[in-house]
Image (cartoon, rainbow, N blue to C red):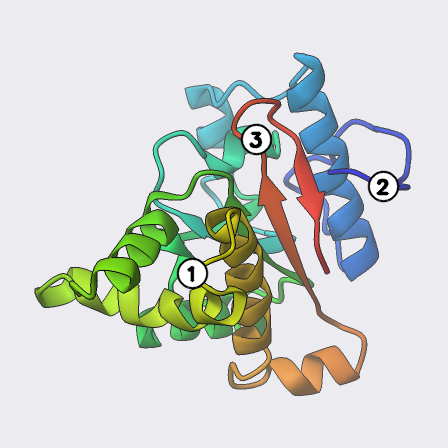
Amino acid sequence: MTGPSPAATPAPAVSGRIVSPADALAELLAGNRRFVSGRPIHGHEVAAAAHASGGQLPHAVVLGCIDSRVPLEAIFDQTFGSICVIRSGGHVVDRAVLGSVGFAVSALNVPLIVVLGHARCGAVDATVTALRTDSRPDGDVGYLVDEIAPAVDGIGLDDPDVGAKAMRAHVTRTVRRMRDVTGVPEAVAAGRVSIAGAVYDLDTGRVELLT
């Protein structure tokens, strides 16, 4: 992630507990820097899976896209038991996503919610195309378009960079949706939970914080 941040430090063992939202974000920042520099410390080996099998103490729940080029544990260099991952097309939210975030906050006590968009998102591009051609896809894919469309409309179809700008706007809208999850407003007000929006660059591997 870009911007001022703490120096990269080794990730804590799964047996530890990150309870501060700021510390949780700092760990993801450091993990992304390790990934970008080609020096990750987690290889996702079976021994690490076994080590975490007795319980989990995740420090974040990350909502991202299903895009196969955006493996969340890898780009944040996180090991088993460290982050809860939710993925949907264009990180679109439905009741299952809301419930999953709520569970991570209320039952697993994660201190951080991250919404991660990415460059050249196919779901966003499909929405732009659908709106330009007035051809909403049938069935469940149409739901993705309907959910992303407000972000596209907010930018305007005539904008030459509508896809990239709409993706960022969609991240911001999704961050606001996270504030409606049961129990999250109270946790945020008490300082126990923070919500961040970010964008992943497919070419560089870097994650940029938006909010």
Q: Which residue is mark 3?
A: 75
Secondary structure found at label 2: loop
Indicate the position of residue 139 as horizontal and vertical percent values.
Answer: 9, 66
Circles 2, 1 touching at the beta carbon (< 8 Å): no
Query: In the current view of this chain or complex, which residue is farthest to the top?
Result: 38
Q: Amino acid at mark 3?
A: Ile
Q: Amino acid at mark 1?
A: Leu
Circles 2, 3 touching at the beta carbon (< 8 Å): no
Mark 2 or mark 1: whose residue is earlier in sequence: 2
Indicate the position of residue 71 as horizontal and vertical percent values.
Answer: 45, 33
Frontmost residue, 207 versus 133: 133
Residue 47 left/right relative to 24: left
Q: Nearer the viewer, mark 1 or mark 3?
A: 1
Q: Nearer the viewer, mark 2 or mark 1?
A: 1
Residue 91 badge: none
Indicate the position of residue 26 as horizontal and vertical percent values.
Answer: 80, 44
Residue 9 versus residue 87 in the image, above or below: above
Q: Which residue is mark 1?
A: 157
Q: Which residue is mark 2?
A: 3
